[in-house]
Image (tube, helix red, strand yellow):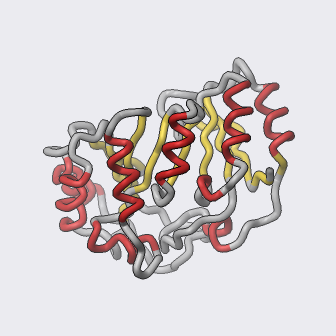
Amino acid sequence: MDIQGLQKMTLLDYPGKVACTVFLGGCDFRCPFCHNGELVEHCPPPQMDSQELLAFLAKRRGLLEGVCVTGGEPLLRPDLTGLLAKIKELGYPVKLDTNGARPGPLRALIEAGLVDYVAMDVKNSPARYAETAGVPGLDLGPIRESVSYLLTGEVDYEFRTTVVKELHDSGSFQAIGPWLAGARRYFLQSFADRDTVLRSGLHPWGPEEMEGFAALVRPFVPTVALRGV
């Protein structure tokens, strides 16, 4: 299995754990604010294969406490199940980042015990979801199914939204709050411009506006926090 990137240590990606982050190429969304544009629009040459990754993880046992798998969209990879099984055999908890567009594979991995924590991106309110995901006419059915499944609490999870001035406003969060009612935790992540972002000319909201958006969600989700502000 090709691995497009590896961050050997992170204190941010897996809540409460010293982890590494594995990057897999390919995605079915084209979010204009995506930081990993090079992984989304075309698969760059692999930095390593799964055997090299597993050898690295075997050496780091006792130092690393978890493995984050992100993309792109990891659930597009048919060989993901086998990779996660081998990571779990080494004793690592696994965090999976997903856009929620593939609820069947998501559920299968969780029910197989191969994922310990899920971070699902909620791109925007339903009314602006397709625009924010960069997919005209996007079917929200699978997204709603993934949200509903995670809300059952079968696995630990978070929902998160990258907040962009050109795409999000108060109405976004007035709709997101009721949609995620009862969720364990929700994070609003401030957009940060980079050279790899798919669309130039996007901007973050300021701290005061971000806190206002968070306040709109808190009546529905008790644990709401800001990141990158």
Residue 88 can be seen, yes or no: yes
Residue 229 can be seen, yes or no: no
Where on the picture, by quarter, is residue 189? bottom left
Which of 146/91 is in front? 146
Instruction: Report whether 135 appears left or right of 126.
Output: right
Which of 168/42 is in front? 42
Provide residue 14's location: percent of width, then percent of height. Answer: 53, 36
Outermost residue toward the top? 62
Where on the picture, by quarter, is residue 109? top right
Query: What residue appears at the point 55 percent right and 35 percent down from the top-left corner?
Result: 115
Numbered marks: total: 0
Provide residue 143's location: percent of width, then percent of height. Answer: 39, 59
Instruction: Report whether 46 appears left or right of 10.
Output: right
Provide residue 2's location: percent of width, then percent of height. Answer: 80, 54
Where on the picture, by quarter, is residue 222? top left
Which of 5/141 is in front? 141
Query: What residue appears at the point 42 percent right and 51 percent down from the top-left corner?
Result: 228
Which of 147/56 is in front? 147
Provide residue 221's location: percent of width, then percent of height. Answer: 22, 42
Query: What residue appears at the point 67 percent right and 55 percent down from the top-left corner?
Result: 77
Query: What residue appears at the point 47 percent right and 60 percent down from the top-left corner?
Result: 101
